[in-house]
């Protein structure tokens, strides 16, 4: 296996000097820098950013939804398993809950937490909070309790919508609980007419947390104006119609879920919900897309890459985001349908760019500004750069966040005055970029250490800060690596740890660190590999020497238990191929070796080809070792050969 260390492309200092506090120009005692653009170039850049598009600045998303409920009350708005709700039914339920929330004191700027797993009540709760005039705070029940507690405490949200079977996070302040399953009998006594509130477009629509470099997540404040502009832009660019069916793929705690919901319910179309298991990119997801004739999906390139390309005649649009898609992926999935590469930080209300690819359009992931937004590539003096020069991407226009909750210093650092439009602001993305001659923008990496893995935004500094809280960790450094072959897109987080010197002969293990982190952060932020070092390698100037960090040696320091049966031998080969690990014991847990849901779907797909039995990702979650999964495959094979289960064949001797 060929391995290499992922290093960000070096940037010539003659073209662009990366931002740092030391390099920021002093606004006092300096002459304005000479402009880098000619008048013709400046005019060209202005034209590329001429994105003014009519929208309804004094309208709110929930009012757009209400208009469809009035015009097409019997149209199907929401489907989930064997349930479906018309626009009238969904609106009535959301109205009843909204009136109930207003009776609890919810009004503009009131934060209401929503901690509900995938179900119709999740959508009803979101609509109700907006209708009541409040702002919603999404809380994924799958997140660790400590992280949920931090979000509730940091936001001071005093009301939580949840279900009776969801564990309630601990908070130091009083928390009013509304269980949408067991309390609905009381909520149902409320009126069904649309409530009113004293909202303004600047009022908060939602607060969503992202990874933070200081060790704690940071809350991003998004207003209603940005949400309405996004609604109309998504419907227009993605070509959504009332007869469309949009898949709701992402967790509510991931801001990519917002466009899915608003472009469905904002257009009179149908929103398709499903359980987590049904949304794993494998046969169940394909069956779901076929069963409900889904026309529009939003998905990460990583998830799309493991989804088999099969006939989906109803599918009209595929939108990818979170990471750059490969040329092969765009080629395969753009045939006969609209394929869009989207980009946008959470701080810009999800999407700042949506560019069609394939079908005559360039097969290259690039950016163009979305409706009523502007994209600028600037140098360290905040001067626009000419075509081909490398600088930091800045975003302006409608939809910029109000800032970070309780973080005025970070807000001032990231949201700066707009040099083009006095009185407005620009968001500093931290992305390196350059203009191409035709006006498209190409991303080239990061200025800071923020990374994206499988579409998730991760600050390695947050993981490092948590690791150093472990009593056996002296220091830690977390990086993203791509040591797999070039044709594999798989990236993974690797943690390098210097343990605290101890007289004990028992050293901490990867499992110890993994369990410690899983109690505090979501699974997608937990490193795949933990490497113990005597000391972190340093450069002569005292910084961590990235090139000297050892390539992960995935040999486990536990007894290597060899396969016992032909089934286990075949599974061992599959585990090695999928995880790209040479030494695996039949007792090693797939997920503790760095496996995740996307790799799980890849493993199951290979297993299905070899064993030709009914096998799903759920089987791997329940039997994550080679030994356990081998026993399950043998049992399933026996059942398929002897439907009445009367055979007494020795399981060990079955050749599969």
Image (tube, helix red, strand yellow):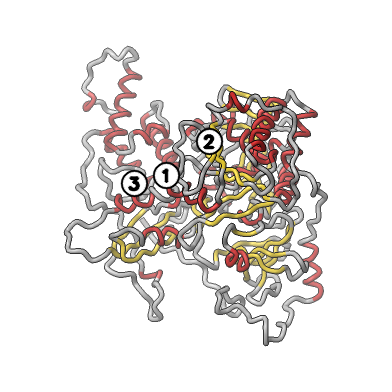
Mark 1, residue position: 596
Residue at 78 percent of width and 76 percent of height: 38
Q: Earlier in the sequence, mark 3 or mark 2?
A: 2
Q: Earlier in the sequence, mark 1 or mark 2?
A: 2
Mark 2, residue position: 162
Mark 3, residue position: 592
From the viewer's side, name the closer residue of 429 and 305.
429
The correct choice, above or below, for 80 with respect to 210 in the image is above
- The quadrant the N terminus occupies is bottom left
Could you give the CA–CA distance between mark 1 and mark 2, rounded to whole angstroms? 27 Å
Q: Residues within 10 Å of mark 2 (few under 14, many from 20)?
A: many
Residue at 73 percent of width and 62 percent of height: 438
Residue at 36 percent of width and 44 percent of height: 591
Residue 342: image location, x then y, percent: 64, 51
Residue 228: image location, x then y, percent: 74, 46
482 sits left or right of 222 in the view = left
Quarter-wise, where is residue 32 in the image?
A: bottom right
Q: Tags 3 and 2 in contact by the CB under 8 Å rule?
A: no
Dot 1: what SS? loop
* Residue 127 in sight from this viewpoint: no
Quarter-wise, where is residue 441 in the image?
A: bottom right
Dot 2: what SS? strand
């Amino acid at each position: 296996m060929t391995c290499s260390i992922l290093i960000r492309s070096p940037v010539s200092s003659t073209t662009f000097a990366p931002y740092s506090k030391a390099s920021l120009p002093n606004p006092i005692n300096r002459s304005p820098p000479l402009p880098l653009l000619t008048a013709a170039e400046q005019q060209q850049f202005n034209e590329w950013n001429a994105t003014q598009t009519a929208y309804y600045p004094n309208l709110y998303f929930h009012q757009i939804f209400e208009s469809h409920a009035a015009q097409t009350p019997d149209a199907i708005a929401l489907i989930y398993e064997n349930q479906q709700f018309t626009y009238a039914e969904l609106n009535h339920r959301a109205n009843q809950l909204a009136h109930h929330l207003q009776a609890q004191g919810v009004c503009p700027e009131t934060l209401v937490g929503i901690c509900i797993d995938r179900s119709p009540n999740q959508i009803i709760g979101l609509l109700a909070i907006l209708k009541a005039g409040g702002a919603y705070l999404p809380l994924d029940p799958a997140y660790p309790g400590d992280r949920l507690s931090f979000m509730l405490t940091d936001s001071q949200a005093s009301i939580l919508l949840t279900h009776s079977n969801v564990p309630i996070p601990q908070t130091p302040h009083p928390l009013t609980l509304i269980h949408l399953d067991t309390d609905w009998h009381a909520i149902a006594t409320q009126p069904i007419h649309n409530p009113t509130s004293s909202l303004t477009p600047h009022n908060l629509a939602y607060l969503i947390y992202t990874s933070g470099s200081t060790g704690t997540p940071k809350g991003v404040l998004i207003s209603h104006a940005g949400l309405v502009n996004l609604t109309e832009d998504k419907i227009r660019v993605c070509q959504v119609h009332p007869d469309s069916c949009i898949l709701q793929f992402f967790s509510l705690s991931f801001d990519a879920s917002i466009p899915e919901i608003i472009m469905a319910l904002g257009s009179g179309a149908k929103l398709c919900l499903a359980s987590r298991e049904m949304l794993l990119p494998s046969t169940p997801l394909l069956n779901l897309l076929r069963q409900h004739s889904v026309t529009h999906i939003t998905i990460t390139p990583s998830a799309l890459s493991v989804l088999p390309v099969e006939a989906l005649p109803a599918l009209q649009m595929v939108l990818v985001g979170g990471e750059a898609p490969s040329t092969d992926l765009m080629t395969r999935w753009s045939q006969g349908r609209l394929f869009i590469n989207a980009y946008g930080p959470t701080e810009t209300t999800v999407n700042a760019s949506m560019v069609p690819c394939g079908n005559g359009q360039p097969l290259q992931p690039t950016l163009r500004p979305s409706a009523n937004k502007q994209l600028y590539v600037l140098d360290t003096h905040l001067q626009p750069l000419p075509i081909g020069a490398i600088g930091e991407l800045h975003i302006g226009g409608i939809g910029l966040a109000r800032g970070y909750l309780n973080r005025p210093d970070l807000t001032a650092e990231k949201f700066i005055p707009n040099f083009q439009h006095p009185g407005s602001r620009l968001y500093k993305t931290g992305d390196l970029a350059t203009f191409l001659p035709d006006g498209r923008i190409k991303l080239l990496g990061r200025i800071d250490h923020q990374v994206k893995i499988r579409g998730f935004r991760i600050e390695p500094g947050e993981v490092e800060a948590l690791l150093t809280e472990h009593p056996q960790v002296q220091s830690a450094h977390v990086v993203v690596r791509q040591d797999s072959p070039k044709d594999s897109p798989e990236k993974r987080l690797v943690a390098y740890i210097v343990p605290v010197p101890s007289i004990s002969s028992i050293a901490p293990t990867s499992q110890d660190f993994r369990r410690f982190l899983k109690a505090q952060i979501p699974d997608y932020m937990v490193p795949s590999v933990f490497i113990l070092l005597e000391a972190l390698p340093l450069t002569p100037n005292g910084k961590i020497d990235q090139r000297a960090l050892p390539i992960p040696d995935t040999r486990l320091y536990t007894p290597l238990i060899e396969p016992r049966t032909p089934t286990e031998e075949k599974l061992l080969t599959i585990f090695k191929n999928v995880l790209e690990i040479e030494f695996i014991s039949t007792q090693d847990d797939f997920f503790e070796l760095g496996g995740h849901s996307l790799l799980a779907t890849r493993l199951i797909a290979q297993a299905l080809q070899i064993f030709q039995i009914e096998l799903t990702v759920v089987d791997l979650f329940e039997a994550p070792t080679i030994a356990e999964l081998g026993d399950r495959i043998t049992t399933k094979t026996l059942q398929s050969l002897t439907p009445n289960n009367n055979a007494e064949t020795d399981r060990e001797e079955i050749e599969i």
